[in-house]
Amino acid sequence: MCRKVHGKELLRLSPMSDIVIANCGGFWGDDPTAARRQVQGGRVDYLVMDYLAEITMAILQKQRVRRPDAGYATDFLTQLGEVLPDCVERGITVISNAGGVNPLACKTAVERLAGELGVADGVRVGAARSAPAGTSPTGTSSSHGRTWASR
C-alpha cells in the first residue's frame, strides 16, 4: 500500500506488519561477533551497525591524513564479511555509519568484499556525505551542509 506525500509515493505498512531491527556496535574495542550473533539469532529485517564515536572519528581522520584511501572503520568489513552472504540470502538490509570520514572508500571496499564473497549481484551500496558549507547536492547555494546519497 502506498500514499503520496508532497508528490512522492511512500510505502505504508499495514498495522499488522512488524519490522525487526537488530543493532550492533563497532566502536573501538566492542564485541567483533555481535553482527553474526544478531543475524544468526532469528528473524532480522534491518541490521544497524554503529561504528562512530568522537574518538573513533579522530582516529579515522588521522588515518586518512596518512593514507587518502583510509578513514573508514575497517573492522566493519570483518564483521560484514561474516554476515553478508546470509544478509543477501535473507533480504536483510544493512545500515552503517562505518564510512567515517571517507564513505566513498568504504563503499568501494564493501563492493570489493561482496565480489570476493560471490554476492555482488545482490548488494547495493550507497554512501552519504555532507555537502561543503554554502553548497547543496544540486549545486545551489545554501547556508548549511546537507547529506545525500551517491553512487
Image (cartoon, grey):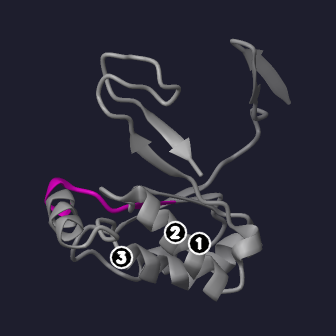
Which residue is identified by label 1? Answer: 111
Q: CA distance from mark 2 to mark 1?
A: 5 Å
In the image, residue 113 above or below residue 50: below
In the image, residue 124 above or below residue 77: above
Which residue is identified by label 2? Answer: 108
Badge 2 amino acid: Thr
Badge 3 amino acid: Thr
Badge 1 amino acid: Glu
- Taking the image as shown, residue 122 lies to the left or right of residue 72, namely right
Q: Residue furthest right?
A: 1
Mark 3 neighbour class, 10 Å CA radius: few under 14, some 14 to 19, many 20 or more: some
Q: Nearer the viewer, mark 2 or mark 3?
A: 2
Given residues 132 and 84, the one toward you in this image is 132
Q: Is residue 57 magenta?
A: no
Residue 41 visible from this viewpoint: no
Mark identifier at residue 74? 3
- Taking the image as shown, residue 37 lies to the left or right of residue 31, namely right
Given residues 45 and 9, the one toward you in this image is 9
Q: Position of residue 139 (x, y in %)?
A: 48, 25
Q: Which residues are magenta?
A: 48-56
Q: Position of residue 54 (x, y in %)?
A: 16, 54
- Taking the image as shown, residue 49 lies to the left or right of residue 134, namely right
Mark 2 element type? helix
Q: Is residue 51 magenta?
A: yes
